[in-house]
Image (cartoon, rainbow, N blue to C red):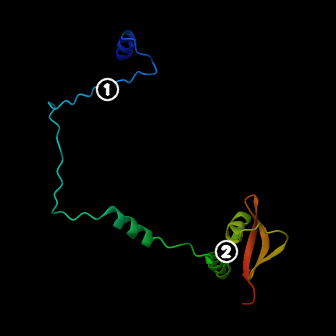
Amino acid sequence: MDQLKEHLDKGGTIASFTPVIDIEIDTSSNLVHQSVDSTVDTPDWLEMVGAIAGAISPPNPISHWDRLYMAAERGYILSTSEVQALTGAKPRGEEWTRGAFLFVREGKIGAQVAWRVVKKGG
């Protein structure tokens, strides 16, 4: 503000005012700098990201069928929400077919309908 006042006192205008910024660097402080030992091999962060990305496999688009096959083989009873999560659709009625699987109503699991999974044709 002092610079603006001085500029106006000398006959300048606000439109012609250009502030001057003074920067002081204090070199008297004793800062501790950490050195890096160049003899130590540290992996490049891009290599680490690549290794992580390579370890993550893309999702299998048909893995839900493997899980349904396992549920049928092991005699699992699934809730409506579990069936919906696996098939992408909500089962209805007493029997419901999705792909190669038949879902048979088997009572309740809590507040949800319970479904027995049966592999059709085998």
Q: Earlier in the sequence, mark 1 or mark 2?
A: 1
Residue receiving disc 1: 21
- Residue drawn 17% across the image and 37% down it: 31
Q: Nearer the viewer, residue 31 or 12?
A: 12
Which quadrant holds the N terminus? Answer: top left
Kind of residue sitting beneath label 1: Ile
Kind of residue sitting beneath label 2: Tyr
Give the CA distance from mark 1 to mark 2: 74 Å
- Residue drawn 64% across the image and 75% down it: 64
Image location (x, y in percent) of residue 10: 36, 11
- Residue 27, above or below 103: above
Q: Residue furthest front?
A: 11
Q: Nearer the viewer, residue 45 or 94?
A: 45
Q: Residue furthest bottom?
A: 122
- Residue drawn 43% across the image and 72% down it: 54
Image location (x, y in percent) of residue 111: 75, 58
Report crowding for label 1: few under 14, some 14 to 19, many 20 or more residues within 10 A (C-alpha): few
Question: Residue 115: which quarter of the image?
Answer: bottom right
- Residue drawn 66% across the image and 78% down it: 65
Residue receiving disc 2: 76
Q: Nearer the viewer, residue 47 or 106?
A: 47
Report crowding for label 2: few under 14, some 14 to 19, many 20 or more residues within 10 A (C-alpha): some
Q: Residue furthest top?
A: 9
- Marks 1 and 2 close (CB-CB < 8 Å): no
Q: Is residue 63 left or right of residue 104?
A: left
